[in-house]
Image (spheres, grey):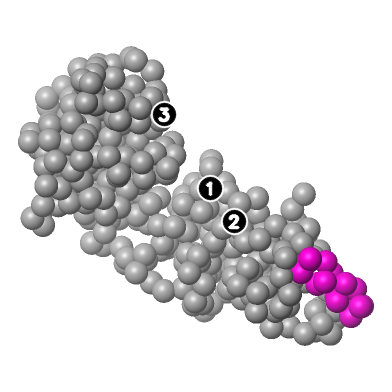
Amino acid sequence: MTVLDATLSESLLLPLYRASREMPETAFMRYALNSVKPLLGFQGAIWGTGSTDHVSITAKSAHLLNVDPAALEAWKRINGRDKAIPLGTGYWGHTFNFHVPTLFSAPEDIEFREYARRWKRKVHLGTGLPEPEPGALQWLSLYRYDDLLYTEQQRQLCQMLMPHFAEALRINRAILPRADQLEPAHESAGNALAIADFDGRIRHAQTQALQLLCLEWPEADCALLPAPLLRLLRGQPEALYLGTHIKVMLRVSADVLLLEASLLSAVDRLPVARAKIATMFAAGHSHKEIALRLRLSPSTVRNQLSAAYRTLGISSREQLIRLASLPGVACAFSRRT
């Protein structure tokens, strides 16, 4: 497969370039990898950018598909001994297909063999391409967790596709505003921002925001807001979603929806009624205001706050604020079981 035929162009490349102009970066990269997964048959993937000295790689960004982030962090610490790096950077654009335990079979490779065993790296399809900046690169690593090598046809297909992946990512970053450079409206360091239309289509998003949404809804379309978020906001100017893994503050602003997402805090993990009271108190409401809004007696609010303080091991509103990291005041809450 040395010549790109019209069928492949229509089925893969045209949608790829179209998506690069329409989707936020993380959603686009996930879409691109999923579009070729049935053809290449990989089980995990890392699509990264960074710099290299042809011995090691300093990763600047990395999109993971079915790969534990801890595996990437572990690789960063030992990648100076990764024999695949000089192969890829010494033969730019060539896709290598190798059995990891075999490549790292020498006695001095024991640390890398242990890494491969821990993270089930059995077979690797890897390609590196230089970027215009000196020393910069993009790379694509496709993993299988069994011993079945990729076919030569799959290797050639990956080699043919990689320049298109790299160019489509450059287009995506050049055309769409870099939402990862936008600052959330609040100072909480754990918040990630996204902007969406009222029909749920995501206009722009920080990478972390999309990762958090995918953590809560793994099967969701990354170009659209999950339905529970849109349902929660109906008829209200703002709302707070408390999920299994994340919380999302939603606000209506002019003609768009603003979202700030973060992992659940210790306060969020309190029982639902107690979490509502604690988050509103952390946001600056008084006992009477909370009681009025939630239709409770002030004494009930005080008792719930006292119980929350005991559970969290704190004694002041300042400590509660630090634990809550709340980006605003909620007008509605999701229901958790």
What amino acid type should be assigned to the residue bearing mark 2? Ile
Magenta stretch: residue 247 in it? no
Does the residue at mark 1 contact the one at mark 2 (Cβ under 8 Å)? yes
**Residue at (72, 64) in percent of width and height:** 312
Name the foreground residue: 42 vs 221.
42
The circle drawn on residue 246 is 2
The label nearer to you, 2 versus 3, is 3
Q: Main secondary structure of the magenta part?
A: helix
Could you tell me which secondary element the residue under label 3 belongs to? helix
Name the foreground residue: 295 vs 3.
295
- Could one spot residue 242 in this view of the protein? yes
The circle drawn on residue 106 is none
Crowding near the residue tagged with mark 2, few <14, some 14–19, many ≥20 C-alpha atoms within 10 Å: some
Residue 90 appears in which quarter of the rendering? top left
Residue under label 1:
215
Residue under label 3:
118
Where does residue 5 sit, x and y in percent of width and height? 18, 28
Horizontal relation, residue 316 to residue 6: left or right: right
Tell me where the magenta segment starts and ends, as one range. Answer: 295-310
Does the residue at mark 2 contact the one at mark 3 (Cβ under 8 Å)? no
